[in-house]
Image: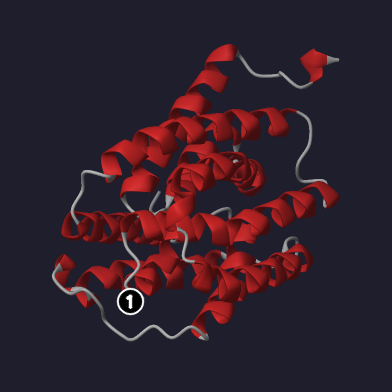
Amino acid sequence: MIEAFFTEPWWIYLTVFVVGMASYIISVISGGGGSLLLIPVINFMFGPKIVAPVINLGDVIGRPSRLAIFWKHIRWDVVRWYAPAAVVGVLLAGWLFTRVEASWVQIIIGVFLVSTVFQYGFGKKKRTFKMKKWYWPFLGVGVATISTIVGGLGPVLNPFYLNAGILKEEMIATKTANSFFMGAVQIGTYTFLGALYGDLWVLGIILGLGATAGNLIGKRLLSSMTDVTFRKYVLGVMVISGLYMILSKTGVF
């Protein structure tokens, strides 16, 4: 019975744990994007069909530890606007999951992410537009819908957090709170659709344990960073994520 769930060699599970830990260390010190960094690795190891369910399950398991670590920094005023809309986005994605080819959407988002480094003057500008609270529900629906289909879009929200003046611990805490309930609905959606089963649960749980370790290490590194350094790391990860999305969907690699 147990063997039916553990179908891979032990070193595969160890690799998933280490990759999860490393990606979430980077995620904490650069404002998110751990899921997107995981996509090429999980895709290379297991193929594209399991990327979204496994990565989102790992996220759901890693989020409680991150919430506990950063709880006092959560901006609840943002959560109230974003989180309910994100749940609507996940439910919409459940209907679109098997019907939509999201490659062209990822290319557009990739171009947007790459452009942010120029918008922010390579980290010299603090803001590029005034972020209003009524923007958050629209972002919640859009980002949750697309991330449920493709497996991760964390960095795409970073410009909006930066323009709202939300940095470092506040950004990590608020993004985590916003996606906590969304993640639970995502897992229910994948299970209902038959996309999450057997060994995929094991891989997702191990990935989540690695993410938990990464959260703890990343918190210690983040506390010693300045706002300027953090902003530059955020922009750097957005550019790298954007380039990956463009190049992977245009057949370069």
Residue visible at 43% across and 86% down in the picture: 132
- Say if residue 239 shows up in the picture: yes
Name the image colouring. Answer: secondary structure
| Residue 156 spot, x, y in % from top left | 43, 66
User: Foreground: 216 or 104?
Assistant: 216
Residue visible at 50% across and 72% down in the picture: 78
Residue visible at 63% across and 41% down in the picture: 54
- Tell me if residue 7 comes above or below residue 67 in the rendering: above
- Tell me if residue 73 comes above or below residue 218 in the rendering: below
User: Foreground: 84 or 140?
Assistant: 84
Circle count: 1
Residue visible at 43% across and 61% down in the picture: 250
- Tell me if residue 51 comes above or below residue 8 in the rendering: below
Describe residue 27's horizontal placement relative to residue 120 as left or right.
right
Q: Quadrant of residue 126?
A: bottom left
Describe residue 39's horizontal placement relative to residue 5 as left or right.
left
| Residue 251 spot, x, y in % from top left | 44, 56
For mark 1, give the secondary structure. Answer: helix
Describe residue 193's horizontal placement relative to residue 200 as left or right.
right
- Say if residue 142 shows up in the picture: no
Picture quarter with the N terminus: top right
User: Foreground: 101 or 116?
Assistant: 116
| Residue 221 spot, x, y in % from top left | 27, 39
- Tell me if residue 181 comes above or below residue 108 in the rendering: above
Q: Residues within 10 Å of mark 1 (few under 14, many from 20)?
A: some
Residue corresponding to mark 1: 163
Q: Quadrant of residue 177?
A: bottom right
| Residue 50 spot, x, y in % from top left | 65, 42
Residue type pointed to by label 1:
Asn
